[in-house]
Amino acid sequence: EVQLVESGGGLIQPGGSLRLSCAASGFSFSTSWMHWVRQTPGKGLIWVSRINGDGTSTDYADSVKGRFTISRDNAKNTLYLQMNSLRADDTSVFHCARANSYGFDSWGQGTLVTVSS
Amino acid sequence: DIQMTQSPSSLSASVGDSVTITCRASQAISNYLNWYQQKPGKAPKFLISSASTLQSGVPSRFSGSGSGTNFTLTINNLQPEDFATYYCQQRYITPPYTFGQGTKLEI
């Protein structure tokens, strides 16, 4: 069974940094494209970033480019999102998701990041 | 970026009803359109790919159609477990992957 479990969220002040983790199991992690998608009540689902299986290719939404870094450790079956210079409008539930050729076929339940002073 | 617009934003229905949710793309996306279902506090679930292909395990009362800019998700014979929020998502030009704002289906 595919499992994705996020962790690392919490309350952080504006300008601060946080690293999210996503522990993966039940599938071939090292060959899978992985994504971060965030969710807010007002704006719904917003794609954040993606990384290919060996970590050599990454992409970011314009809103996080230069502030967030996606990475992975295939030996630990873990996906990461390093978030710097956090802003109030980054407040979201962050989901990690596995992608197949057609869409996001597995999702984690998410971890809540609250940016507030 | 391709914008996705869903309508309605919310919808009330009863068990046994049929409902249709519409998703419109800001430009033609062929059939590169996915649908997801999300229940409160849960992860989204992949329902339909390529506008009309049901994912494994999805009941046949769900169906999708459309091409170009206009797409629909239809649920026939609504069951209690179908009350959730539904999102469309385009994969025609990515990144970014863009989602509709969601349609909340309520009893």
Image (tube, grey):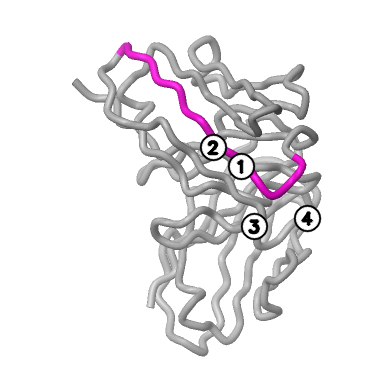
Which residue lies under the disc numbered 4?
A: B50
Question: Mark 3 — on which chain does it sit?
Answer: B
Boundaries of the magenta span: A15-28
Q: Does the CB distance between marks 1 and 4 fall below 8 Å?
A: no
Q: Is residue A8 magenta?
A: no
Dot 3: element: strand
Dot 4: element: loop
Which residue lies under the disc numbered 2?
A: A37
**Residue A6: x percent and y percent?**
49, 39
Question: Mark 2 — on which chain does it sit?
Answer: A
Question: Mark 1 — on which chain does it sit?
Answer: A
Q: Have a look at marks 1 and 3 and say if they share a chain.
A: no
Q: Have a look at marks 2 and 1 and say if they share a chain.
A: yes
Of discs 4 and 2, which sits in the foreground? 2
For the residues labelled 2 and 3, the Cα–Cα distance comes to 14 Å
Q: How many marks?
A: 4
**Residue B38: x percent and y percent?**
50, 59
Asked if B80 appears above or below A50 in the picture, the reply is below
Give the quadrant of the N terminus of chain B: top right
Q: Along the polypeptide, which appears first: circle 2 or circle 1?
A: 2
Question: Which residue appears farthest toward the left when viewing the image?
Answer: A117
**Residue A112: x percent and y percent?**
36, 38
Asked if A63 appears above or below B36 in the picture, the reply is above
Of discs 4 and 3, which sits in the foreground? 3
Which residue lies under the disc numbered 3?
A: B46
Q: Residue at x 76, y 51 (%)?
A: B68
Dot 1 amino acid type: Ala
For the residues labelled 4 and 3, the Cα–Cα distance comes to 12 Å
For the residues labelled 1 and 3, the Cα–Cα distance comes to 11 Å
Which residue lies under the disc numbered 1?
A: A97
Q: Residue at x 69, y 49 (%)?
A: A26
Q: Does the CB distance between marks 4 and 3 fall below 8 Å?
A: no
